[in-house]
Image: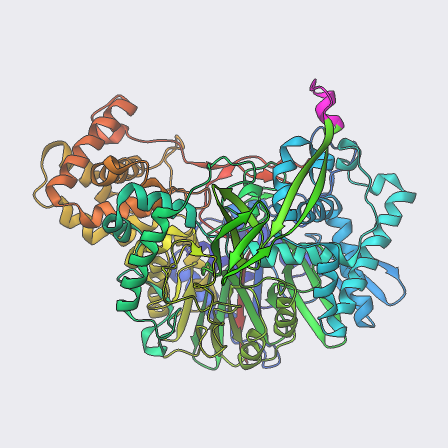
Amino acid sequence: MGTWWPIAVWLARAGPQVASPAVLGRVGRALRAPVVPVGVAAVLLAAIGPAAAAARIRRAVDILPPGQSGFVSLSGLPSGTGSPHLQDQTALFLKHRFKPDLFGQPAESTESPRLGVTIRRDRFGVPDIKGKTSYDVWFGAGYAMAQDRLFQLELFRRATTGHLAEILGKDYVAMDAQVRRDFYTRAELDAQLARLPAPLRARFQSITDGINAWIAETRSDPSKLPGEFPAVGDVPADWTPEDSAAIGVYLARTVPSDDGEELDNVRALRALGPRLFNLLLPLRTRGQVATIPRSSGLFPSQPGRTRKQERAAFKRSHAFALSLPLPETNSANGGGGGTAATARRLPLIGALGRHGGSNMWAIRRRGHSATFWNGPQLGFQIPELFIELELHGPGLDVRGTTAPGVPVIGIGHNAHVAWGLTSGLTDDDDLYAEQLAGPESYFFRGQRLDMSCHDEAIMYRSPPSDILGGHPPDSGTKTVRLCRTIHGPVQVRGGDVAYARRYAIWKHEIGTLVGLADVNSARSVKDVNRAAVKLTWNENLMAADDRGHIGYWHPGLLQIKPRGFDERLPYPGTGEAEWRGFLTPRQRPHVMDPKQGFLFNWNNMPSVGWTQGDAPARERLLGRYHRAALIRLRLRKAIRAGGGFARTAGIDAYTGTHAEQRVLMTGLIRRIGRGASGHAATVLKTILRWDGSFARTNRHGTVDPGVAAWQTFTNAAFRRALGRFEPGVDLLTASRNDEHVFESTWGEVYALQHLPRTALWKAAISAFGTLRTRFGSAKPAAWREPRRMYHPSSQGAASMPDIPFLDRGTYEQVIELGP
């Protein structure tokens, strides 16, 4: 019995009708019901019958844990409580269940903040906003956003303009400095806004007016003000269009990818030498799992570049890298890393920036229908980074999610099309080593150029909560000197070199909203194809329409790099390593209606032969064992079983609870185990008896012995293969992140693929000793550990308890489209 059957039963009962309170009561009983035998579930699915011909979106469900709201009242500060919608979706999420996502859910409250605007909220607090004009719609959106997420909006505008330390203290000075260094002045934001089409530009003012209308209400009725404001000694100032622009710019830059790791790559190259460096950080990996099948075309990341040119470029870059003076890794200006990496290490702002793990898939079905799934992963926190809205006005009927303050729906569906996003992770920025001619001048193409420099005064102040907690008050100002070269912001210095980062999307981040707005109003996948051309960011886009068409795009401003230097290492800034333009829309990876009948993405490569560059997503080096291969495996199985809405949703119930590489490497593990004996055989047999589930527990709440055996064995294999090359090897092979606790690292997969069997047996023997010591027993039955837990972060005073770890998106939607 597959893991999708409980989901199948619920989806069968919940759709396609609009869920009334009575229906929701039946859904609740279904959630509490035992797993239904396969035959019964099949009957239930068949009993639904075809949806009415007029129903374009036949079924739609989604989930946004922990909930829609982030409001914590002043009286609720000690307990982190306030809105009933802070955490009312968590229980459903943990059971792999969803809530209705069709248009027009039954309202539990209705209000009209101004003439022409109506806001109806459903039982989960999701606002359905209707406006007579476009201004009314986006005014209502801003008003509802502020009702639900006013303190989060305040954090976002401060985080994305470099003013967090003013309310949160000295620990945030470094992040404020990095934001002001790498992003834009108010005048530069205004210039981006001015380039937008007038209707889209007007949205920024509309949403601003809506937010300010709610802020005005909090001033006249302090009970509406989130309790965090007095806790940090702050009051919300009026919102501005530039505040929304700053949030959009920050997310457009940091969510699709993060700054490259060129300086760490130089350190690794020096420690490991060129041969091992190329083995552990190849430009491309054999057996790449690509979203676009080879039969649908090849899209090279650097068209026309030959392997011979790549070898010559590496030789040249190797010599250049050895000559570079490297900065201290703990430099006051930060390393080559970007603001998103810094933000994720700080409390309150942990979810800003890229989190790997988003997935999506689309299936073409008979009868001109399609099913679509998207599960973006942005780090579990309270409140979520996303907020959910339903919007209806002139030329706009859409439901989905966006970031608070941003006047467009990022992920969702309209009456004809469903679409989703995952991080593209392409290397769309490069680090240039500027040869200094003086403290604030450098050489470029034989000329001495002055940097553009200015001082920034960063104020910091301890919040009152720190003082009440016994910490002495601390406030002051730190002045930092920020400079730019012709390539971009200077991020760090070393000796006579300043390292400046060039971003392909520089000063064009807001432009991506033009494409997203067109996606929101698309009536077909062909319309989405036209909209994708306008996207400036590198978020993978996938869509399905009500005629059964599906498509995928790897969009954005993607630079054509210099052929004479290696893309994994810093480029010389003296003029001989400049970009050669950008990929045209035709050159960017894209496909519609592939012959295989389905598409999938889990942050894997867009096309066969696409190169990794210096991007930080080391998991893409896993080749055939990349986690996306598990989605492909389950998709094919679901399609063979008939596909459909429930089976599409059920894929996530499997991939989100199983260790990807354990499942994908079953054949390899069997080969390793042949001929093994003694303690090695004990460990390997324990692993093979385990099916990869890290979620299934016994009555004591402990998981299969294979969980501990697998991770201990793979770590031992890594140490045996590459341990002697530390610390340099750690810079390339990566470590697990919070979103993929059970995903094997590149170093572990490399070891399992390259070590001889005898060496892997020795690794298994070593693992046996570690397991025996840890659990106090040589019997595998005793190697059971408690199920791993996830520790959600907080963007405010709300408190979310630890939840069982699931390798899933932090927002998920399932859509069925067709006649």
> In what quadrant of the picture does the N terminus appear?
bottom left
Residue 53 in view of the camera: yes
> In what quadrant of the picture does the C terminus appear?
bottom right
- The x, y position of residue 340, in whole percent, is 56, 47
Most extreme residue toward the left is 675
- Nearest the viewer among 45 and 3 is 3
Q: Which span is picked out in magenta? A: 464-474
- Nearest the viewer among 477 and 592 is 477
- The x, y position of residue 218, in whole percent, is 86, 44
Q: Relative to residue 56, is residue 317 drawn left or right?
A: left
Residue 88 in view of the camera: no
Residue 777 magenta: no
Residue 467 magenta: yes
- The x, y position of residue 242, in whole percent, is 75, 57
How many marks on residues? 0
Give the answer, above or below, for where 350 lies relative to 488. above
Q: Residue at x 79, y 68 (%)?
A: 202
